[in-house]
Amino acid sequence: MPELPEVEALAYHLREHAVGRTVSRVDVVSLSVLKTVTPQWTELHGREVTGAGRHGKHLDLECGDLHLIVHLARAGWLRWSDSLSPAPPRPGGKGPIALRVHLSGPGFDLTEAGTKKGLAVWIVRDPAEVPSIARLGPDALELDRDRLGTLLAGQTARLKTVLTDQRVMAGIGNAYSDEILHMARLSPYATPAKLTAEALDRLAEAMHEVLTGAVERSVGQDAARLKGEKRSGLRVHARTGLPCPVCGDTVREVSFADKAFQYCATCQTGGKPLADRRMSRLLK
Ligand SMILES: [Zn+2]
């Protein structure tokens, strides 16, 4: 799933390549991705792209006073093309293309792989009209140590859960929370409100290091290469069974019905493995 660094890189790409161009046409291939009825997507036709930005994990293509907002969800992606076919993709087709934006020559497709659909698009006059944007906490890139301390002070859910709760702070998902917790040497199950001052220092520093590092690696990369770039920068996420690059212990995982997270027991939990329901079922 694209998180803050990847969405930031996509926004950068659009600022470099789309701003100043005119939307010649928008093809809505999968009507179900469109979450707003008015303004209609045809109102974008003939408008100039005036900017591109990010709200948490949402991408914002600004066309004057209209915003095309995209949430890529788990398997969505933006595929840029320098010469997009002028023919509209077949509606209702089985392909991954959900929506195509023609920018008089180049353009991009919003695609979604798999059967579980979560890709969402809104056309609004104000980004705050999108409910999931209106609820966003402050952006994770902009949090200093004191602000982070204030946000975590009253939180009693697990640290991993709180870091990925977009209402507390915006932009961090499953992959980068694993990376941040590993760098900060903190358990995913730590209680945020009980972190020591020293642990909070490490967390704030790790959050800054991991996110800015990933943004620097991603920005300027071809949209097509972004996913590979993300993977190459990860130290524990999606690396179950591989050695921890810090201590050499085996990276462990806790799995749920539809996702899993990874951590290093030596670095993060005092050498004690966290309970994993699937693992303990297998051991019975
Ligand atoms: Zn380790």
Image: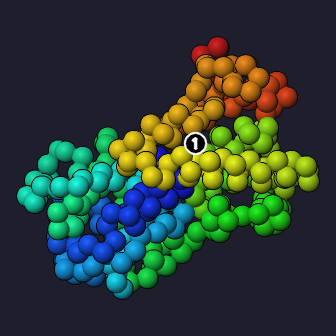
Residue bearing the label numbered 1: 175
Q: Residue furthest top?
A: 283
Image coloring type: rainbow
| Residue 38 location (% of width, % of height) | 28, 81
Of residues 52 and 163, the one drawn nearer to the viewer in this rendering: 52
| Residue 159 location (% of width, % of height) | 74, 48
Residue 226 in the figure: left or right of residue 251: left
Q: Is residue 263 visible?
A: yes
How many marks do you count on the picture? 1
| Residue 48 location (% of width, % of height) | 27, 79
Q: Residue furthest right?
A: 197
250 in relation to 126, above or below: above
265 in relation to 220, above or below: above
Residue 190 in the figure: left or right of residue 81: right
Residue plotted at (84% across, 56% down): 193
Picture quadrant of residue 186: top right
Residue plotted at (17% across, 72% down): 24
140 in relation to 6, above or below: below
Of residues 175 and 20, the one drawn nearer to the viewer in this rendering: 20
Of residues 207 and 36, the one drawn nearer to the viewer in this rendering: 207
Element type at mark 1: helix
Residue 170 in the figure: left or right of residue 120: right
| Residue 282 location (% of width, % of height) | 59, 16
How crowded is the residue under tag 1: few (<14 C-alpha within 10 Å), some, or many (20+)?
A: many
Residue plotted at (65% across, 40% down): 178
Residue 197 in the figure: left or right of residue 214: right
Q: Residue furthest left?
A: 87
Quadrant of the image containing the C terminus: top right
Residue plotted at (48% across, 39% down): 229
Picture quadrant of residue 241: top right
**Residue type highlighted by circle 1:** Ala
Q: Is residue 74 visible?
A: no
